[in-house]
Image (cartoon, rainbow, N blue to C red):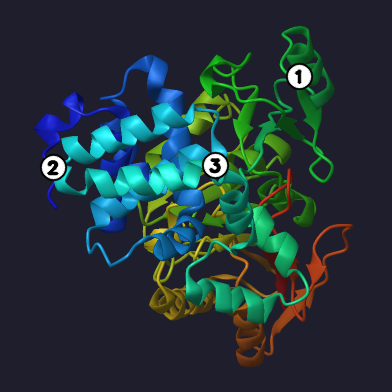
Amino acid sequence: MKLDPLKLSSYNLRAKVTSILIDIQKGESLSNLLDKYISTVKDKDRALFHELTLGTLRHWHSLKTVTLPLLKKDLDNPTVETLIYLGIYQLVYTRIPAHASISETVEAVKQLGFSPLSGVVNAILRLVSRDLDNFKQALIESHGLPSWLYKRIKKDWPTHLPQLFRSLKETAPLTLRINQQKVSRNDYLTLLNDLNIHAKACELSEVGIQLLSPQIIPKLPGFNEGFFSVQDEHAQLCNQLLGDLKDKVVVDACAAPGGKTTHLVEQFQIKKLIAIDSNAARLNKIKDNLSRLDLYHKNTDFDIVHTDASTWQATEEIDFIILDAPCSATGVIRRHPDIRLLRKSSDIQQTVELQSRILKNLWQQIPNGGYLLYITCSILKAENEYQMESFFNEYPNAQEIGICSNWGIEQKYGKQLLPETAHGDGFYYCLIQKLD
């Protein structure tokens, strides 16, 4: 079905949520769609729009699993099936009264042009509303992943499955990284406390703060003054592995939108920082973030380059390369639940091959004695431990530098962090030095 953008503003909220979910099923990412859709939603309804959209995506495969037995025959209608998932999500996971959830969802069926099936949707949602406890339990017990990803995770992490599946269906915490050029973590915590904004210091990151209630980021104190950035706690651990980078030439490869770039400048007196990325629009975000955080005044020479990391050539001697490699992003599914629908099994091998090409090219740019830190936000061993195993087999002049930390799961090479309830996302780190 082709949804008419001209009619979008006249749709009720459930129809708008369904419209964006249909576009995602067609292969478009939530981040690319959100601004267009949210502009059609009234201010008072925007929080609910986000909740219904992200929540339905987060539980998509679980909702599909419990819906199939309720259908007497295959509807072969993605729009109506999406409305059923959305309706069940509202009944089970929100405080919206059942009658309102059902009536608004059934109205959306009609608005989207499927009035003959409105009775089917109404009947299914009423059935669910009369047996909420059992349906909620069924949703909890479902792993909630596409079958190909379920099989890979089960193979990679057999002893972590119950907690891992549970964590991946939860909402990720909102975490800030304090810009210590501007304010200390303790002082910023005090500032939040004085404003009755509940927060706590992160356990692993020395500069992280976890917000304990939903907040509008630009309205937090010190946003315009550059007091903080939004960054997952496990992503913040990068800087703890780098040693002293004073007066070094550092490359941040695949750098956009600049979380690691800005963190480097906040912490180290780097001689030159070269940030490279193949996405020109996202590179502009690095510049914006450097400006907001007031980091251009530092004694650091910046070179922000639009280029492909698999072909980029250094024009000067490099001391350290940080490669936040392209990956499946399976470690950040909680923040980007559309990954559950967008990512395909065939994507993994293509990504592994791309990672390998980038690694090989960047390795040639490092002089003897230099370092490379390999990072992904994936929990799949093919992109992490196994990728490193292939790399070390091919390059005898590469030596792993062990990560001495109280976090992460030790792998044959590197350390893996898994998504944890009320903690950070899934990240992988492996530190490598080039020998003579």
Q: Which mark is residue 424?
A: none
**For the residue carrying disc 3, how many other residues have a C-alpha within 10 Å: few (<14), some (14-19), or many (20+)?**
some
Badge 3 marks a residue whose secondary structure is helix
* Residue lying at the far top of the rendered structure: 194
Between 141 and 319, the one lying in front of the other is 141
- Tell me: 117 left or right of 154: left
Between 245 and 99, the one lying in front of the other is 99
* Any part of residue 83 in sight: no
Q: Please say if 103 is above or below 352.
A: above
Q: Which mark is residue 188?
A: 1
How far from the left and from the top, in percent, is residue 32?
A: 32, 44
- Tell me: 38 left or right of 48: left
Give the CA distance from mark 2 to mark 3: 26 Å
Badge 2 marks a residue whose secondary structure is loop
Q: Read off the residue under disc 2.
A: 113
Q: Read off the residue under disc 3.
A: 92
When asked about the image quadrant of residue 16, the answer is top left
**For the residue carrying disc 1, how many other residues have a C-alpha within 10 Å: few (<14), some (14-19), or many (20+)?**
many
When asked about the image quadrant of residue 164, the answer is bottom right
Query: What amino acid type should be assigned to the residue bearing mark 1?
Result: Tyr
How far from the left and from the top, in percent, is residue 426?
A: 65, 58
Mark 1 or 2, which is nearer the eye? 2
Between disc 3 and disc 1, whose residue precedes?
3
Between disc 1 and disc 2, whose residue precedes?
2
